[in-house]
Each structure stands twice: as structure tokens, then as C-alpha cells.
Amino acid sequence: MDFEFSDDQEQLRDSVRRFLGDRAPVAGYVRPLLDGAQNRRAEVWNGLAELGVVGLLVPEEHGGSAGPAATGTGGAATGAAGTGAAGTGAAGTGMVDAAVVLEEMGRVVHPGPYIASAIGAVTLVLEAGAPRDHAFLLPGMANGSVVGTVALLEPGRRFAIDTPTTTAKRLGDGWVLDGVKVHVPEAVGSDVVLVTASIAGETGTVVFAVQTGSGGVTVEPVVTVDGTRKQATITLDGAPGWRIGGDAPDASGAVALTVDRMAVAAVIDGVGAAARALELAVEYAEERVAFDKPIGSFQAIQHLCADMLRAVELGRAAGYYACWAADDGDPSEAHRAATMAKAFASDAFPQLGGSAIQVFGGIGFTWEHDIHLYYKRLLSLAYTLGSSDDALEDLATIVLAPS
């Protein structure tokens, strides 16, 4: 198997890197958004949509991208790096092409709803929805005019997503929902939230689409350690919604696949943030002089940087393999790969961020330096869609399950 990126994917990477460097730099774009409730500006989000990267997982018939070619870089999509695949299922391309974008976003700690909308909401609509849901929701998500998110977690229930306590009941020809969802990513500024709920008399999980501007919906921002990753609590009190998939049975499988893809997306974003944190640390170690020598000549600093490099490369290998498995592996292998990648990254990347802070010393703790933004981004990854303990417990279940 060839693990090199195709020329088209390298051109996609270059296009996204140039766009983010010009339109969304850390100093001029990321920092001004840190203290606000909303995590994007329309001109940047629309620019990403014009590049074609917001619709990478949306089928072409619903306005999605045909692959890296859609960004104006030339060529056709090749899906997983070097495999010649263009993704599986109904997706426009695949997770590997999306990963190229995600890694570049991580390198500049880019805020915004890319994972929540372009990965999570799109995947859940595709997997749980009926053709009418696809036709109604996906075109707007592909062109950036509709921003979606997913609401899976509930207060006091850790990562119990299979048995939601949020309830839905019939009201006339429609549905109304009651319940509370917590840690909802990028909810402020989203147009549609996909909510998991239960229905009396039915088994399993059902997904409903709720417009955040509807009556009975309260979105309350929550302060987190990472200002580039906004979260909110959503309270539903008789909120109107429509059932994704019509009267289709249990949507637990679609929810599980969505969680896996969002987790892998967070890992790849973390790869980009970790790689950039390492670069910044090495650059500083070459410039900072102590006892008449660059601190990079000291063995203790060299060990820190070597450990950081090991973590970046192992995380990159695990993350991209999980993306390949999502595109071209069987479902069980895709889940196993996603779980392994999340378990490793949730543990190793926050440690890497801490090591980078150690290289910088006191200046790394100051608000003026960017390295703390990378540390916070990597720290938030540790608890995104479950902790390393949750992932390891899941992995143990997979490995020890009778064959």
C-alpha cells in the first residue's frame, strides 16, 4: 500500500494552508474570537465553502465536492492516500481528503464548526436520513449556508449515547422534544442541531432535526478551557423537530458511525496542532540562549522534543489509518481504528502540549504567546467525545469480544 498523498491532495493542502494563512491567521482572526460566543466569521466560513472543503463528504447530487479537484487545484479525488479510492457509501469523497483540511486547521488552531457541521452533521444526515432529508439538509450544508451540529451527550451520564433520556412525542402531524443536551459543539450560530432522543413504545435511538431559532429551544454558551472550541448546553422544552429517516428503525448505528468520524476528525486536527506546537518549540530551542548556548543543545530539551516528535508521528499514523478505514475498511475495522486513534491521541497529545510549554518556560504561560493556544487545543481533545479511559474501555471490549 502506498501511504504517500496524491498530487491532488498535496495541492488541496497547499490551497487550504494559503487560505487560512491569508484569511484566518492566529493573531488577526483566532484571537479576536476567543472570548465571544460564536466561533466563526461569515466571510471565512463562506470562503471555505467556496474552496469546496465544507462539502467534501456530501454527495455530488446534493451539491457536494467531487474531491480535491473542486478546490480548483486540478485532478480528481483519490480518496485514501495512494489507494485510488474515492471514499465509500454516499459520501462525496472521503475522510482522508477531509483529513488533509483538518490537519491544516489544527496547525492554525482554526475555530469554527467544521467538525460539527461538515463531518458530524453531514455524516448523521447521510447515515440516518431518508432521501428527503438528504435533499432538504445537505445542499445547504455543502455550500455553507446551513451550519449543523450534533447533540448527543446529557448531564450526569458521561458518554452514554445509546440510551438518551431526551424524549420525543407526537403533536399533531409533527414532533416535540423535551430534554437537556450538554457539550454541544459550536451550537451558538448553528442553524440546525441533530438531537438523539427516545420515543415511548419504541426501542433504540431516534434522531431529530431541530432549528435552533425555534420556540422551546434555549442555547446557553458554556465556558471551556479552549476558546477555539465552543460548547453550549441546549434545553428543549416542547421544541418542534422532524424525525430524520422518517419511521426508520433504531438509528444507533448511524450515531455510532458519526461519533467515530468526529473522533477521528478531532484526532487529525490534533495532529496538526501537535505538529505546529513541536515546530514552535524547536524554533524557540534554537533561538533561546542560556549559559551561552542555545537551549536546544541541552539533553533535557532534546529529550522533550524527541518525545514530542514520536507522539506526532504515531498520532498521524493512527489518525490517517483510521480515516482510510472509514473510507475503505469494513465497519468493524473502521470502529476499531477510530477507537485506537482516539485512545492514543487523548493521552499523548495533551502531554505533548505540556512538553512544549516546558520548552518555552515562563513565556509559554503568557497570554501574548501562541503556544498556550495549542496546549489548550490539545488538552480539550482529551475529553472530546469521551476520554482516553472511555476509548480504552471500548477497545478492550472489541479485543476481548468472543470471535
Image: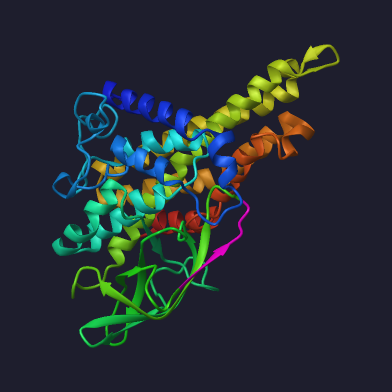
Furthest-top residue in this view: 292
Residue 129: horizontal and vertical position, in percent? 21, 63
Residue 7: horizontal and vertical position, in percent? 28, 21
Q: Nearer the viewer, residue 99 or 4?
A: 99
Residue 257, quarter of the rendered image: bottom left
Residue at 61 percent across and 59 percent down: it is: 223
Residue stretch rendered in magenta on the structure: 218-225
Is residue 196 placed above or below 2 in the rendered structure? below
Residue 289 at least partly seen: yes
Residue 375: horizontal and vertical position, in percent? 63, 41
Question: In what quadrant of the picture does the C terminus appear?
Answer: bottom left
Magenta part mainly helix, strand or loop?
A: strand
Furthest-front residue in this view: 43
Q: Is residue 289 left or right of residue 189?
A: right
Residue 16, quarter of the rendered image: top left
**Does residue 136 show up magenta in the picture?**
no
Q: Nearer the viewer, residue 391 or 401?
A: 391
Residue 229: horizontal and vertical position, in percent? 53, 51
Residue at 71 percent across and 16 percent down: it is: 287
Q: Is residue 104 left or right of residue 53?
A: right
Q: Nearer the viewer, residue 195 or 45?
A: 45
Residue at 42 percent across and 26 percent down: it is: 18
Residue at 63 percent across and 38 percent down: it is: 353
Furthest-right residue in this view: 291
Question: In what quadrant of the picture does the N terminus appear?
Answer: top left
Residue 316, quarter of the rendered image: top left
Q: Is residue 301 left or right of residue 342?
A: right
Is residue 309 placed above or below 338 in the rendered structure? above
Q: Nearer the viewer, residue 403 or 133?
A: 133
